[in-house]
Amino acid sequence: MTRGMAADHVTSVRMPDDFDAFWDELLARAAATPLNPTLEPIPLRSSDQVETFEIHYDSLDGVRIAGWYCRPRASYIPPPYPALLQVPGYISEPTLPKSWAKLGYAAVGVAPRGKLRSNAQFNPGYPGLLTHNIVDKETYSYRAFYIDACRAVDFVQSRPEVDASRIGVQGGSQGGALTLTTAALRNDAITCGAAGAPYLTGFMDAASLTHSQPYEEMNEYMRLYPEREEQVRRTLDYFDCINFAPRITAPMLVTVGLGDDVCPPETAFDLVRAMSGPVEMITSPRCGHDAGIYWTQSRIESFLAEHLRPAGIEAGR
Amino acid sequence: MTRGMAADHVTSVRMPDDFDAFWDELLARAAATPLNPTLEPIPLRSSDQVETFEIHYDSLDGVRIAGWYCRPRASYIPPPYPALLQVPGYISEPTLPKSWAKLGYAAVGVAPRGKLRSNAQFNPGYPGLLTHNIVDKETYSYRAFYIDACRAVDFVQSRPEVDASRIGVQGGSQGGALTLTTAALRNDAITCGAAGAPYLTGFMDAASLTHSQPYEEMNEYMRLYPEREEQVRRTLDYFDCINFAPRITAPMLVTVGLGDDVCPPETAFDLVRAMSGPVEMITSPRCGHDAGIYWTQSRIESFLAEHLRPAGIEAGR
Amino acid sequence: MSINPKPEDFGAYWQAVDDELAGIDPAVELEHSLLRSNEHSTMYFVRLTSVGPYRIFAYLSIPHGDGPFPALLQTPRYGSVNNPPHFDDRQRFVVMTLMHRGQRLADKPYAAAYPGLLTEGIEDPATFIYRGIVADCLRGAEYLLSRPEVEGQPAAVVGDDLAVLTAARRPGFTAVHYNLFTFYRMMEAAPRTAAYPLEEINEHVAFYPNSADRVARTVAYVDPLHHAPEVKGKVLVNVGDPGSLSGPEFLEPLMQAFGSRAEPYVVSHEGGTDHDAADAWIASQLGSVPKPRLWLEAMG
Amino acid sequence: MSINPKPEDFGAYWQAVDDELAGIDPAVELEHSLLRSNEHSTMYFVRLTSVGPYRIFAYLSIPHGDGPFPALLQTPRYGSVNNPPHFDDRQRFVVMTLMHRGQRLADKPYAAAYPGLLTEGIEDPATFIYRGIVADCLRGAEYLLSRPEVEGQPAAVVGDDLAVLTAARRPGFTAVHYNLFTFYRMMEAAPRTAAYPLEEINEHVAFYPNSADRVARTVAYVDPLHHAPEVKGKVLVNVGDPGSLSGPEFLEPLMQAFGSRAEPYVVSHEGGTDHDAADAWIASQLGSVPKPRLWLEAMG
């Protein structure tokens, strides 16, 4: 088996004619749904500096979405705060972003449907989310999942302590994908985004390049249902970060491990090539799905801080 | 295929040596669990005569159990009221027992785990409950399910408007089984019970006599896992109504359709033969799983009224 | 004015559902079930997209052997779950049992409440949950009738009002067994009973002032009386005791609407007897053999 | 007094767990998964009873062919889900991946909270959730090692502290890859970080007055330091940067407790490099071939 230069990879993802119409219609439907946000303080996980809340809000299909919300106490750092959305990986728990709040961010650990505490009404199981109802764009698992993450933008916009002109989004793997989709779908609101090792990018190409989870779910599914390939590709084109890329206008940081067996780097190059806004790409040799975080973590933090200017970092805390 | 006299059937159910110890230990564990009952009024489903509540209480494994509770308004019939537990069938929804409350009963529509509104923490799916974890008496689905129904006795005992010396239980099919298990396990509290077409009685014999649901689940399971038969029998002996029968002391009414393809009448005869308390059995020729309800409904109502003496019936309402 | 007029836009209302369905890819997924297959037939779990869009579920059992086989559609009952196809039917027919939106196996993200489903969105025909539920049945019917195993074979549909509505709007069914009434003359029927699910209507009308007219307007769209003229096949109608809500005099307008296609079956209330009669009728309509259960009735 | 003494009844505590397990029928259920099987191996879903009683879940992948095959146990991570066995491992080993109580696929009726699991019942060794979680791992290990396909073959266990505890209490494992620290010197480690899951300990101790001593007493039972002397096989220990919580000086007592059986692996922080090194070590311990992933590293 030979494998060419990742940067030379040619994607098999196609842009559907009605891609924008599909998502604009869903966004409009979401916007017409009252958010009904609630915040419940969690004293156990709060401190003198940071207040932690469990939050909930409504999303598509009447599904209630959970999340963590951490904000600096006013006595520690006075408002307004920039907002930072932490979007979760495929097998990760939603982040409880206390450490980000300590830096001056009003930070949300987003928990789209299917994640713990958001899975009462939608629960495709694990593994399973990746192929759940994959034959139809209208019912594919990620359709509302992406919107659930976007609704966290509405949540921070509803908070008086947040400066809504500064909203960042960050995550790795599936969190990298949600960073991109949220920046694309809410390009009216997102200031910057940092995506590590983006998943849900070149799905079918990725599955052909790896046998690691979660893309292996795709291989297992296609092994059992080979006749569905075209139908599956037709669905996935609506959900591929490569097709979201042109909608992104905010500055983005993309970090990639050149030895990533989970989300093959070929697909990250395909992605970056499709982006038309400002993008900084950092590739780390011999790194895997860690995307070189050991070396790039500080750059991620400084990138977000440059664009979002949290008071805690500006004050050198 | 020939089929003998149902009354001559010989059960294959065996009584485990530690049957009583097994259940007494579970009852003790349940008794040590605070009930934490809550009642939420449901005005939509209440009337001038009857007040309806959605109730919840705690049961084994920290699982929260739901139910409906309907009681006469004091202005309509003054307390105290006899209690009547309505226990649900396998595919039925829990009863909202407004019509029983109108007769003067404080009536509970019991919803053991897995039923709607009691399925957040335990949800083996349907079909599936009958064979869920069936290889082990300690983890078999019905272990806590039976206890959940017993806890409804604790619930009515906690109500000041209830005369705890009059507690009846009634249901058909799985509700027939729960009538028997509750009368057996809570023979300290149950005044009388009416069991129609009892399910969960002679499980393996029943499965060999029918291909109707739900026992067909057993046949499907055994077809796939024939090597588990002995293990399954060993589990089921702890859950068989035939083995609960000797513990029942309250008067019981058992109604059976002689053409019941769902719960074969052979098993009902085996059951009644194992009962040592007072029992009235009504068999209806050519009737199926309806157990002749068209003809026996009035007898069920009069049987319960004789033992429980609800004021509404006594007053002729 | 009749208490139960057919809405003026009745045809347009249902045509819009058909149009909406036609614009949605059913996106069929078929999953083989080893556990639920048996010596006579193979079981598949089917997932389909209906209006909404919403993903619904069906059991599909196909007999072993070459076929073709007659088709049997079982429409969903009023309740959170439905029994899978019966062993006896699976030997003779391609059987589909449908779970509509909100029922177990089709309850993510929407889980129906019981009681509660019957009045969900009932104040407006456009929001009434049964608009979608009927669409679910139609989607299932389309798929069943499109299976190559049933090509050229007779097809039957069995169930409550949903069976009638399905047969009315999908002409492929040659036989209908209409065995339970819910929407038939509902505004007259509900006040005469305190039993659920009709009691949900009584509760709704009592609780929400002046809602009766709106409810009546909505349920007229799903009244089998107005769909009966469109049913092409033969119809077996369960008839109950005189004076009851399934009594012959209450059903008379329905039987007239079906005309000569309808045949009454006067229920004996003996479950075994009634099952075997219905089974024999279905079998004869589908050119198959009866599978009575009473022949081996246990002797008391 | 040491900050981290071994409890006096350490042996009795764990013996009681073993005794309890021995008295419980594992009641194995094995379900074949067509979807998760592949050209190299068959996947089974395994359900077993552990203490409680509680029903746990494991993936069990068995290579095609005659065998026997080396065994690989992957203990559960700290999180609500675990990846199924990897395609590469499934070609070489009989692989079991375990879900402990509270994790997805073993989360009915008990679903673990994250954060939250780490401190559940932590005020008393008898109620600490990890008593049951360790039992779950032991139950899984017993089953894996009893499979006829692995008879006479070497066995490895890979994971965080749970891998060490499992190897300490079940002597069949010839190799352990200890790749992540949670309970190791936890009361010293937690104050030095704000990262979860150790932050749960900080939160608990700050929130509940005077709880630190009780927590320290409880977690001593699960500290790998006290289990290390019982591990019979070779141990590969991931060692991080000096000064960190996995730095060589912090790990020194652990390495001493393992003695000559332990081998440090100094992590490069390059995920590809570190994976391939660990894989090569496991492969050599199990008499198998390495499956490096970097050989086909994409070129930027």
Image: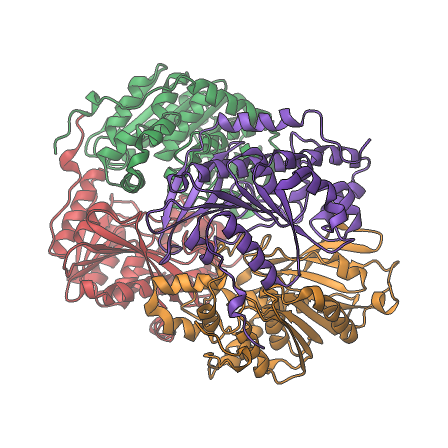
Chain colours: A orange, B green, C red, D purple
Which quarter of the rendering shows the C terminus of chain B? Answer: top left
Relative to B232, say whether D290 is above or below.
Answer: below
Q: Quadrant of residue B210?
A: top left
The image position of residue D195, as x and y in percent, is: 73, 53
**Residue A19 at what x, y percent from top left?**
50, 80
Question: In this orientation, does residue A164 appear?
Answer: no
- Residue at (43% x, 29% y) in the render: B137
Q: Quadrant of the N terminus of chain B?
A: top left
Name the residue located 70 percent from the left edge and 62 percent from the top edge. A108
Please tell me which residue is depicted at 14% across the width and 60% down the height of the picture.
Answer: C67
B214 relative position to D169: left or right: left
Q: Where residue A101 sits: x, y (%)?
A: 78, 61
Q: Is residue B309 visible?
A: yes
Query: Exactly how many numbered labels are in the figure?
Result: 0
Q: Report which quarter residue B15 is drawn in.
A: top left
Q: Residue A252's spot in the image, x, y percent? A: 67, 77
**Which of the 4 image quadrants contains residue B287?**
top left
Seen from the viewer's position, the closer of residues C138 and C6 is C138
Determine the residue located farthest toward the front in the rendered image. Answer: D260
Side of B111 where C23 appears, left or right: left
Please state which of residues A230 and C4 is positioned toward the viewer in this rendering.
A230
Q: Nearer the viewer, residue D142 or C251?
A: D142
